[in-house]
Image: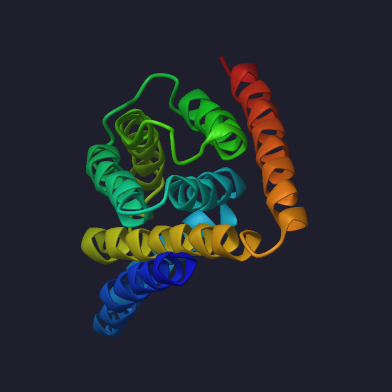
Amino acid sequence: MSTFISSQRLRALAFIAAVLFPCSAFAHTEAAAAGFMSGLEHPVFGFDHLLAMVSVGIISWLLGGINIWRIPGAFVTAMIVGGVVGAYQVPLPYAEFGIAISVVLLGLGIIFSNKNTSPLLVTICVMFFGFFHGHAHGMEMPRAAEPVYYTFGFVVSTSVLHVVGVVIGELSIHRAQLAKVLRVTGGAIAACGMFFMLQSTRGV
């Protein structure tokens, strides 16, 4: 049974990688490279975004099965919608606070999520968070960047971070000590989210 589950997870990871990575070859012009690279780098160098996206991958792994790709897919879909709204410079009240609280709740999700957790509830929450993160990406899009390539860049980067989260979860299953570290990591992520929340309220 464990071998079957393991192979199922590996197939899910392979599918995600096959869909995402070959597409990067299309970003080959200078304008596209600028937009693509800007979008690619933004989630990685934004610490709040990085923590949230890796957390989504870990939580999807904790729920298991079809959720390994469905939950990250829901996040990315909502993020794209939020990115389009942000690209048109449509304001979103308390956007920074929304991003900060998403980090808190996703960190707590790592601590408390398991295979009995409601996938529907997690998916709804993740889509809500994804919209906030996407909106931030869209609002911060460089004016010189090509919107399509920029969006493609942050979608690829986000998806890779989700895969990283899934891989972290997969590695933790082999040792009980690592599983405990995973839960502690969730607490640390939630604490970082609290710090982000305090920062965001200073500007209110």
Q: Residue furthest front?
A: 1
Q: Residue furthest top?
A: 204
Q: Is residue 165 above or below residue 10?
A: above
Q: Name the residue located 65 percent from the left edge and 65 percent from the top edge.
A: 174
* Quarter of the rendering containing residue 85: top left
Closest to the observer, 6 or 10 = 6
- Answer yes or no: is residue 38 visible: no
Q: Position of residue 34 (x, y in %)?
A: 37, 71
* Residue 98, placed above or below residue 44: above
In this picture the colour scheme is rainbow
Q: Indicate the position of residue 197 as horizontal and vertical percent values.
A: 62, 24
Q: Quadrant of residue 112?
A: top right
Task: Give the number of callouts.
Answer: 0
- Please state which of residues 108 and 50 is positioned toward the viewer in this rendering: 108
Residue plotted at (61% across, 17% down): 201
Q: Quadrant of the N terminus?
A: bottom left
Q: Is residue 118 above or below residue 152?
A: above
Image point (40%, 34%), residue name: 129
Tell me, yes or no, if residue 185 can be seen here.
Answer: yes
Q: Position of residue 136 (x, y in %)?
A: 41, 40
Residue 25 left/right relative to 34:
left
| 32 horizontally vs 166: left or right | left
Image quadrant containing the C terminus = top right
Picture coordinates of residue 125, whole percent (x, y): 37, 30
